[in-house]
Image (tube, helix red, strand yellow):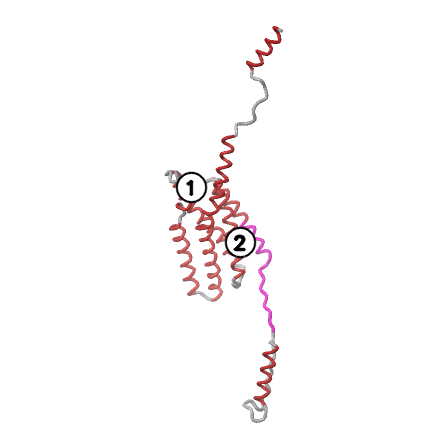
Amino acid sequence: LSAVVTALEGKFNAATAAGGALEGTFPIVSVVNETSDGVLPASYIGKAAIACAVFAVLAFVYVSLRYRLSMGVVAAICAVVGGALTAALATLTRIPLTTSAIYVVAVAALLSVVNAMLTFNKLRASLKADGAKGKSDEEWIAESVATKEIATLNGAIGAALVIVGAIASQPVRWFALLALIGVGVAFLVGWLYAPALYVPVKKQADKNAAKKADYQGAKSRKKPVAETVESEQAETQA
């Protein structure tokens, strides 16, 4: 800004000279720098990370017991990705953050798992109806994505946030915007990321299951009983 200061000083000097428009005044041109720092307490960030980790474990256990182990793995990953991506986008977009942002991150992780479970429901129903026969994993999973259910759920939540942001005060409006980002992340994680991730996870799970089915255990090195008896009789005759 030094060039700007010099140019303004020249203009004011000319204007305050005898016969100038600002004759008799004494304007001063200066540059002032202000820095405003807003930092979330480290304890809040740590608690948010711990909460997401615990929720990922709970999601893994619940989904594994209700559906399949492979689906539980995907659900746990979706919880971590949903929360982490929401926090990253909130930071990159430079939305004013307060301690309430932690709740948005936690809800985004929860909603990501809920969206993934909607697809898991359709996948399980498709398996029961033999809808996967004659199709590759990619085709079967792509056809079983719960697009309508996920869009309806997240669309309703997003519309509510837009209404709240439109009629609320400025701080609440920022919170609604951040929450809207979280809903968008959860939608993409449940609708796009979870099905794409489930394809390689399922293939690996099927390989592990096939290996266990083919495994018959180590062969015994002991001779059969009949062979042992015949050997002893031969030695006795000799």
Badge 2 amino acid: Ala
Estimate how packed mark 2 is, as few (under 14), some (14 to 19) or many (20 or more) residues with alpha carbons within 10 Å: some
Residue 162's place in the image compared with 117, above or below, is below
* Place of residue 92 in the rendered image (x, y in percent of width and height, measured from the top left): 53, 61
Residue occupying image coordinates x 57% and y 11%:
230
Residue 21 in which image quadrant: bottom right
For numbered disc 1, what is the local secondary structure? loop
Task: List the residue tagged with mark 2.
Answer: 84
* Place of residue 141 in the rendered image (x, y in percent of width and height, measured from the top left): 42, 44
Residue occupying image coordinates x 54% and y 47%:
54
Dot 2 or dot 1: first in sequence order is: 2
Task: List the residue tagged with mark 1.
Answer: 136
Of badges 2 and 1, nearer the viewer stands: 1
Badge 1 amino acid: Ser
220 or 85: nearer the eye? 220
Q: Is residue 26 magenta?
A: no
Task: Tell me the quarter of the image containing the N terminus.
Answer: bottom right
Task: Tell me the quarter of the image containing the C terminus.
Answer: top right
Magenta region, residue range: 33-52
